[in-house]
């Protein structure tokens, strides 16, 4: 059975179509990523799925329950970690967790095995005010609080935004470990490098889904020659390459430019062009497309 089924959901705020006719489903036990830039509509879609916002059109079920008609029942079966931390800063670590357990009519000990791995890292600080924790620790506590009633489906809205790189990596490792409990997880993120951690991903932009596939499947959607190009004068290089007769697109990606060309173009063609334009120390190499390349290409044609 699919844990989340979304059928033609739309939601507008005035003229803004925050979610525009979105359909997709998430399988039971899947770690599914919703990837998209700020304003893509991820938070709005999450709020609809966790019953905090009613859609204008379409329908959706989570764990078999309708997000509008069965919202009361559904709220007991889902965990939600909103983008901004939902902790009580003046309560201690332990008090926060007890509070969330009590709201759902359970206790910390009843579901301790689900959070043990994560909570042991917090236990030394259990009397510290949540407001005085580091970003990474707050994130772990918020995850424990979202899990304490043993939900069937967990929604994590941008859980790693504003968190340092080490904590981000640790957080994804925690989510991977949670999979053994059969939990279904929908995670949104603006970071493309996190997409590879997911079983499947949906790429979202301006309220619409551009693609749904495994991370490898999304990479393979890219079907043009792709080159990484470097030279001493990066700014001039991008200007010249964008004017080149063989170029389709050219973007900066870290220290290299990613260049897509018409079919049949070789590194030698590009190199000759760069020499003609007096570029020094140039390097041109064919590369495999990553998720970000696919996303850029889909956004162009979307
Ligand atoms: N309550 C609201 N009133 C008016 N416009 C809204 C409201 N909520 C969202 N929007 C608009 O809807 C669009 C989608 O916003 P949403 O927050 O869902 O995107 P997002 O992908 O989660 O991005 P972010 O990371 O910025 O939260 C944006 O243009 C946003 O300005």
Image (cartoon, rainbow, N blue to C red):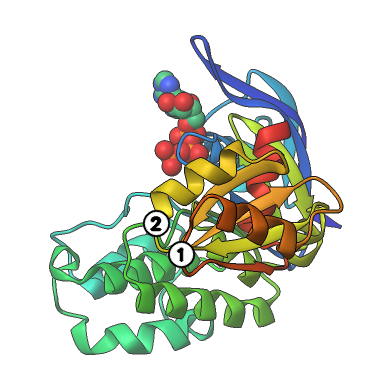
Q: Please give the name of the residue rendered at 40% of the width and 77% of the height, measured from the top-left corner.
A: 108
Q: How many marks?
A: 2
Q: Nearer the viewer, residue 62 or 155?
A: 155
Q: Nearer the viewer, residue 222 or 22?
A: 222
Could one spot residue 114 in this view of the protein?
A: yes
Question: Which image quadrant shows ligand 1?
Answer: top left
Q: Secondary structure at mark 2?
A: loop
Q: In the displayed structure, would residue 83 be above or below residue 298?
A: below
Q: Position of residue 67 (x, y in %)?
A: 66, 36
* Left or right of residue 215: residue 150: left
Could one spot residue 26 in this view of the protein?
A: no
Q: Is mark 1 within 8 Å of ligand 1?
A: no
* Left or right of residue 272: residue 37: left
Q: Position of residue 284 (x, y in %)?
A: 62, 66
Q: Is mark 2 within 8 Å of ligand 1?
A: no
Kindly report which numbered mark, 1 or 2, lies closer to the viewer in this rendering: 1
Specify the quadrant that holds the C terminus: top right
Q: Please give the name of the residue rendered at 26% of the width and 75% of the height, measured from the top-left corner.
A: 94
Disc 1 or 2, which lies upstream in sequence?
A: 2
Q: Secondary structure at mark 1?
A: loop
Q: Which mark is residue 233?
A: 2
Count residues near mark 2 (Cα–Cα under 10 Å), then give few for <14, some for 14-19, many for 20+.
few
How far apart are labels 1 and 2 at the CA level? 8 Å
* Left or right of residue 261: residue 234: left
Q: Position of residue 178 (x, y in %)?
A: 59, 78
Q: Please give the name of the residue rendered at 38% of the width and 57% of the height, measured from the top-left corner.
A: 161
Q: Nearer the viewer, residue 99 or 84?
A: 84
Q: Please give the name of the residue rendered at 19% of the width and 67% of the height, measured from the top-left corner.
A: 130
Mark 1 touching mark 2, by CB under 8 A? yes
Task: Give the image quarter of residue 165.
Answer: bottom left
Q: Which residue is mark 1?
A: 280
Specify the quadrant that holds the N terminus: bottom right
């Amino acid at each position: 059975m699919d844990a989340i089924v979304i059928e033609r959901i739309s939601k507008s705020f005035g003229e803004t179509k925050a979610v525009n006719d979105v359909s997709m489903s998430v399988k039971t036990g899947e770690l599914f990523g919703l990837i998209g830039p700020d304003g893509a509509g991820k938070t709005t879609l999450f709020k609809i799925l966790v019953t905090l916002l009613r859609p204008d059109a379409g329908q959706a079920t989570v764990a078999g329950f309708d997000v509008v008609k069965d919202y009361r029942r559904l709220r007991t079966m889902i965990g939600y970690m909103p983008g901004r931390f939902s902790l009580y800063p003046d309560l201690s670590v332990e008090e926060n967790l007890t509070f969330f357990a009590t709201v759902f009519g359970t206790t910390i000990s009843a579901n301790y095995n689900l959070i043990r791995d994560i909570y042991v890292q917090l236990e030394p600080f259990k009397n510290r005010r949540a407001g005085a924790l580091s970003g990474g620790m707050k994130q772990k506590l918020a995850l424990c609080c979202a899990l304490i009633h043993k939900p069937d489906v967990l929604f994590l809205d941008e859980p790693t935004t504003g968190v340092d790189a080490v904590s981000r990596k640790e957080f994804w490792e925690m989510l991977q470990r949670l999979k053994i409990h059969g939990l279904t997880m929908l995670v949104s993120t603006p970071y493309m490098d996190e997409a590879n951690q997911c079983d499947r991903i949906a790429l979202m932009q301006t309220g619409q889904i551009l693609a749904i596939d495994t991370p490898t499947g999304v990479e393979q959607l890219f079907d043009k020659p792709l080159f990484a190009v470097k030279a001493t004068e990066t700014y001039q290089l991008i200007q010249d390459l964008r004017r080149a007769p063989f170029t389709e697109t050219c973007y900066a990606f870290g220290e290299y430019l990613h260049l897509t060309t018409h079919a049949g173009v070789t590194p030698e063609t590009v190199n000759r062009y760069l020499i003609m334009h007096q570029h020094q120390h140039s390097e041109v190499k064919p590369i495999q497309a990553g998720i970000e390349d696919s996303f850029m290409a889909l956004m162009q044609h979307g």
